[in-house]
Amino acid sequence: MSLAIFPDIMSFGWNSKKRQVWENTYTQKSANGRRKALCTQSYPTWEIECEYPYLTDDQRHQLAGFFAQLQGPTSTFLWLDPEDNIATDVRIGTGDGTTVKYYLVRNIGGYLEPVKDIVDSSLVVKVAGATRSVTLGDDGLIMFGIVPAQGAAITATFQYYFRVAFDDNNLEWTNFWYQAHKMGSFTVVTVL
């Protein structure tokens, strides 16, 4: 199944806000003051709030049509975040002489988060600094035809999408001038 890609709309204005959310965390404090915490979520949920201060009539139609085709929050799609979409020379593993499959990750200040949806043409994988050919599988899995040597650093550079869904049943815009529109704030959330 191929997911729809959010329209690439170049507008005169763009505002966005991103939140990292750890929803399934539980904390408890004992009588002696010790704190215990538990998180049942492996990776954060990302909430991306967006706003277009200016859209042409055609751009508004494009966004409204996309929202309608997905029936609002009922379908998942791919979001190419304008400010956060490239992983450069991320270490994805070390060759052990037998493993040929590795998963792509992005590095956020030392925290490695899996990346499932890659812009195919952007992927460059290196073993010990030399570019190698790989096959890109599902969910960010790459496969080597030739086994990476033991101890060889495996790095990847690629552009990625966030797999998201709209967080609301509504999409709102305002017509402030003839064929000029302002798209109200909308939020997309990452999904598995």
Image (cartoon, rainbow, N blue to C red):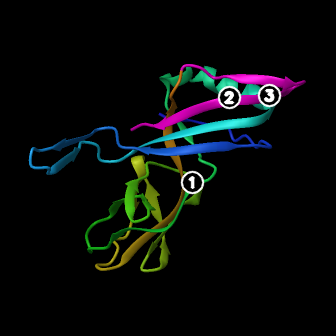
Could you classify mark 3 by the number of other residues whose Cα lies within 10 Å: few (under 14), some (14-19), or many (20 or more)? some
For the residues labelled 2 and 3, the Cα–Cα distance comes to 9 Å
Q: Judge whether residue 175 is colored magenta.
A: yes
Q: Which residues are magenta?
A: 169-192
Amino acid type assigned to the residue bearing label 3 in the image: His
Q: Residue at x 32, y 73 (%)?
A: 94
Identify the disc placed on residue 84.
1
Task: Work out whether 156 lies above or below 121.
Answer: below
Query: Would you say residue 93 sits in the magenta stretch?
Result: no
The residue indicated by pointer 3 is 181
Q: Considering only vertical position in the picture, is 112 above or below 149?
A: above
| Identity of the residue drawn at 54% across and 40% down | 48
Counting labels gives 3
Neighbor class of circle 1 (other Cα within 10 Å; few <14, some 14-19, many 20+) is few
In this rendering, does residue 104 appear at all?
Answer: yes
Give coordinates of residue 169: x percent, y percent. 54, 19
- Tell me residue 12's x, y (percent): 80, 43
